[in-house]
Amino acid sequence: MNIRFEILDELKQEVLILDVAGGEVIGKIFTPSGTNKDIPNAIQVCGFDEAFSLWGCGVFCDEKGNPKKDIQLLFNKNSRMDKYHKVNLDLCGRCLGKDKCNCEDLRLKELKEIIVGKIENKCNFKGLVK
């Protein structure tokens, strides 16, 4: 699956993230961020499945040459916009779980988790990889 970006509305400052093959909207980027769009100078990215640990960005830095941060987000084609999704705010206001709290799934993955997954998928050394 490949993704592409489409500016939805420059005035609303929203960008759609689409699955190239199916044309489905699988995510969205908007600013200001926050539930009430009350955090200026920040973006919110919705629809991704996993976030990988922070890195030092090799492209951006401050005036002293200190690197800015870089994060990778993984999108899958199983993401869909759901205007009618009912969430239980009393259950968990952080993960917006429908039937149960899903906060254990809301974490950054480490590089070794990504590499091990690639090794296991490409090789038959599953018993040797820890």
Image (cartoon, rainbow, N blue to C red):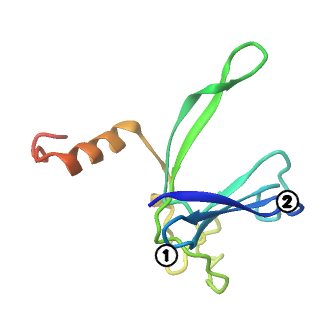
Name the residue that disc number 1 marks: 100
Q: What's the residue at 59%, 65% (across, down)?
A: 18
Residue 55, x across and y down, in percent: 54, 31
The answer to whether 3 is drawn above or below residue 101 in the figure is above
Tell me the kind of residue under disc 1.
Lys
Position of residue 89 in the picture relative to residue 54 (left or right):
right
Q: Quadrant of residue 90?
A: bottom right
* Quadrant in which the N terminus is drawn: bottom left
Figure disc tally: 2
Disc 1 is placed on an element classified as: loop
Q: What's the residue at 34%, 37% (across, down)?
A: 112
Residue 72, x across and y down, in percent: 53, 44
Q: What crowding class fits label 2: few (fewer than 14 Cα within 10 Å), some (14-19), or many (20 or more)?
A: few
The answer to whether 101 is drawn above or below residue 115 in the figure is below
Instruction: Please report whichever mark, 2 or 1, sits nearer to the chain's N-terminal start.
Output: 2
Q: Residue furthest top?
A: 64
Q: What's the residue at 65%, 58% (across, down)?
A: 5
Q: Which mark is residue 12?
A: none
* Quadrant in which the C terminus is drawn: top left
Circles 2 and 1, Cβ within 8 Å, touching? The answer is: no
Q: CA distance from mark 2 to mark 1?
A: 36 Å
Mark in the foreground, 2 or 1: 2
Q: Residue furthest right?
A: 11
Name the residue that disc number 2 marks: 10
Tell me the kind of residue under disc 2.
Glu
Choose between 79 and 88: the one closer to the eye: 79
The answer to whether 29 is drawn above or below residue 127 in the figure is below
Q: Residue furthest front?
A: 21
Disc 2 is placed on an element classified as: loop
Q: What's the residue at 78%, 47% (across, down)?
A: 42
Residue 74, x across and y down, in percent: 49, 53
